[in-house]
Image: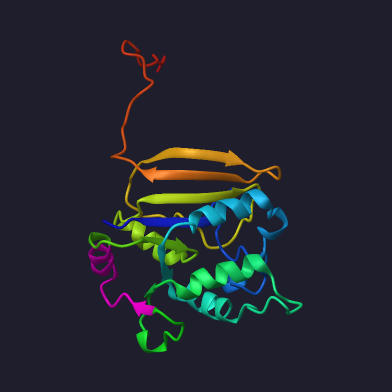
């Protein structure tokens, strides 16, 4: 069985839009692209490295796929070049080699190597992929796809990097109409700049309870 792991950068009010650059996603007039960049440090780099430290396939929505396809194949690979960055090169090598499964209506335009369309019935395709033997499926960005995955209870793990900012507007990770479900916090840590890195595993069903006193009486009103 393969697992679906969702990795996401998240503001305190649940926004995940354009975390990496102003031009990444301006939909809806979003003004705060690049809001995670000032918080980057070795601890966040280590958390991201851990996410991709084991064999994986990528699971992407079309918008995130296009952003990635316009970037990772073109990262400098020559160590002698002035623009060479070892961390970027290592990430590019992993992403370029990985198999990419994409939720798209235009499969004929998937030009990045090792890319495959999920077809018209995305939930059915993902259930089939999860039933196979193989590496875990990692989702990055792809907010609309994540909401679809949550609606069909297909997410096995959430790895959330929660930043100490309120953005007000923007695309949110958790939208209305999602399936009710519980998660178990497996691990959490915080960075010096206040970013909380939380690892949640899919739990069971939501449990209910009450704080009401057994012998509580309704208040009496004079009318």
Quarter of the figure with the C terminus: top left
* Left or right, residue 203 beside residue 185: left
| Relative to 134, residue 184 above or below | above
- Name the residue: 58% across, 48% down: 162
Q: Quadrant of the N terminus?
A: bottom left
**Of 153 and 197, the residue lying toward us:** 197
In the rendered image of this protein, does residue 203 appear above or below residue 179? Answer: above
Q: Which residues are magenta?
A: 115-129
The image quadrant of residue 3 is bottom left
**Residue 11 drawn at (x, y percent):** 59, 52
Horizontally, residue 198 falls left or right of residue 110, namely: right
Please provide percent x and percent y for residue 16: 55, 59
Q: Residue 85: image x %, image y %?
A: 69, 70
Magenta span includes 118: yes
Location of residue 29 with respect to 11 vertically, above or below: below
Residue sitting at the far front: 80
Q: Which of these two is toward me, 27 or 98?
A: 98
Residue 218 percent coordinates (x, y): 36, 16
């Amino acid at each position: 069985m393969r697992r679906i792991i969702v990795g996401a950068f998240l503001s305190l009010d649940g926004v995940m839009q354009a975390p990496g650059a102003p031009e990444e996603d301006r939909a809806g007039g979003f003004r705060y692209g690049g809001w995670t960049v000032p918080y980057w440090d070795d601890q966040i780099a280590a958390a991201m490295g851990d996410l991709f430290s084991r064999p994986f396939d990528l699971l992407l929505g079309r918008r995130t796929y296009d952003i990635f396809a316009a970037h990772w194949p073109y990262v400098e690979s020559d160590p002698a070049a002035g623009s060479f960055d070892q961390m970027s090169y290592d990430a590019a090598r992993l992403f370029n080699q990985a198999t990419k499964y994409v939720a798209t209506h235009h499969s004929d335009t998937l030009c990045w190597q090792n890319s495959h369309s999920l077809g018209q019935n995305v939930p059915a395709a993902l259930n089939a992929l999860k039933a196979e033997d193989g590496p875990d499926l990692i989702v990055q960005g792809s907010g609309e796809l994540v909401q679809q995955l949550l609606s069909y209870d297909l997410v096995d793990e959430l790895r959330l990097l929660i930043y100490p900012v309120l953005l007000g507007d923007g695309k949110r990770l958790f939208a209305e109409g999602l399936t009710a479900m519980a998660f178990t916090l497996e691990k959490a840590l915080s960075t010096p700049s206040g970013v909380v890195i939380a690892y949640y595993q899919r739990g069971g069903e939501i449990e209910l309870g009450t704080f009401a006193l057994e012998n509580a009486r309704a208040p009496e009103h004079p009318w």
